[in-house]
Every structure is written in structure tokens, then in C-alpha cells.
Amino acid sequence: MKGAALAFVAIFFILITIPCVGVGWVGYRLMTRLGRFPSKTPAIQMSVLFKLIILEVVSWTLLLLFFKVLVAV
């Protein structure tokens, strides 16, 4: 039982870490671009919004897929 719990925690940690790293990377690029081009703030924010929406959908899909796999077992 301990092995299964450890595997669950490891997989869940990886599934949560991927979106966190992605959001950090997108945020870093946002700050860099806003620092270089402050007059283009709305356009830069809209491009980041689209990337964040995609990242959110992918992360929820991975979590739901993980849940479905666990329920099926």
C-alpha cells in the first residue's frame, strides 16, 4: 500500500508542477516584454491570456485523465 501511495503522490506532484512551471515561464516572459515595450501593454496581456487559457485547459485535462485512470483501476 505504501508503494501505491508514493506513486500517487509522485504522479500528482508532476501533474501539478507542470502547470506551475508553465505559468512561471509565461509570467517571466510577460514581465520581460512589458519592461521592453510598456506602450504595448494590452496586446502583450492578450497574448499571455491566450497562452494561460491553453495551459489551464491542458492541466485540467491531465488531472481529469489521471482521475479517470485511477477510477478505472
Image (cartoon, rainbow, N blue to C red):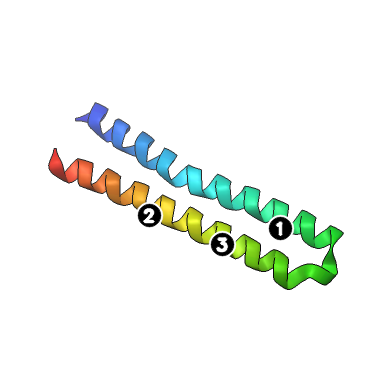
Dot 1: what SS?
helix
Q: Residues within 10 Å of mark 1 (few under 14, many from 20)?
A: some
The residue lying toward the viewer, choosing from 53 and 6, is 53
Among numbered discs 1 and 3, the one appearing first in the sequence = 1
Name the residue carrying label 3: 50
The residue lying toward the viewer, choosing from 58 and 72, is 58
Dot 2: what SS?
helix
Among numbered discs 2 and 1, the one appearing first in the sequence = 1
Name the residue carrying label 1: 30
Residue at the outermost left position: 73
Q: Is residue 30 left or right of residue 48?
A: right
Residue drawn at x 66%, y 55% is 27
Residue drawn at x 41%, y 43% is 15
| Type of the residue with mark 1 | Leu
Instruction: Write down the quadrant of residue 35 in the picture.
Output: bottom right
| Type of the residue with mark 3 | Phe
Alpha carbon separation for disc pair 2 and 1: 23 Å
Residue drawn at x 25%, y 47% is 67
Name the residue carrying label 2: 60
On the image, the x and y values in percent for residue 72 come to: 14, 42
Instruction: Write down the quadrant of residue 50 in the picture.
Output: bottom right
Dot 3: what SS?
helix
